Amino acid sequence: MLDLISATALTTSASHWQNFVTILLLVFGLFLVLAGVFTAYFGSGKSRMIGVLLLVVGIVAGIGTALLYHYSLGDGGSIFALLWESFLVVLAAVVGALVAVGIFLVAIMKS
């Protein structure tokens, strides 16, 4: 019985770390893509090239995340389920952050 409990705890711990790393890499890639698009569009000369580089690194980070977990999910788990769940967490975090920044800006502008 104790072996079953500790095995379950290790599996749960591993899946939590896997989710953490997936979300971390997806957020990293997403914000690099956004920063790259912004810099490439509004920048000029050297900064435009840096924006393109950020965009490419962000895309590689996203694809690398998908490939990393495609090969590490040997337990029958679905890469698409993991990435979709992680994407929803990232989306919720971004929406929450934008709402908080919006409230902050409104409060500062009104004072």
Image (cartoon, rainbow, N blue to C red):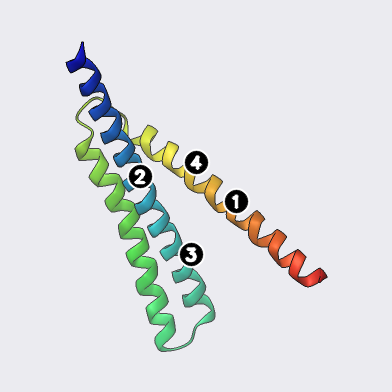
The quadrant in which the C terminus is found is bottom right
Q: Amino acid at mark 2?
A: Phe
Q: Which residue is mark 2?
A: 20
Dot 1 or dot 4: first in sequence order is 4
Marks 3 and 2, how far apart at CA: 21 Å
Left/right of residue 102 with respect to residue 47 in the rendered view:
right
- Residue contact between numbered discs 1 and 3, judged by CB atoms under 8 Å: no
Q: Residue furthest top?
A: 1
Q: Nearer the viewer, mark 1 or mark 3?
A: 1
Q: Residue furthest right?
A: 110
State the residue in front, 110 or 91.
Answer: 110
Q: Residue at x 26, y 35 (%)?
A: 14
Marks 2 and 1, how far apart at CA: 19 Å
In the depicted structure, whether residue 45 falls above or below residue 107: below
Dot 2 or dot 1: first in sequence order is 2
Q: Nearer the viewer, mark 2 or mark 1?
A: 2
Q: Amino acid at mark 3?
A: Leu
Q: Which residue is mark 1?
A: 95
Tell me the element at label 3: helix
Marks 1 and 4, how far apart at CA: 10 Å
Whole-percent x, y for residue 39 in the image: 48, 76
Whole-percent x, y for residue 41 in the image: 52, 76
Q: Which residue is mark 3?
A: 34
Disc 4: CA contacts within 10 A as few (<14), some (14-19) or many (>=20): few
Q: Amino acid at mark 4?
A: Leu
Q: Which residue is mark 4?
A: 88
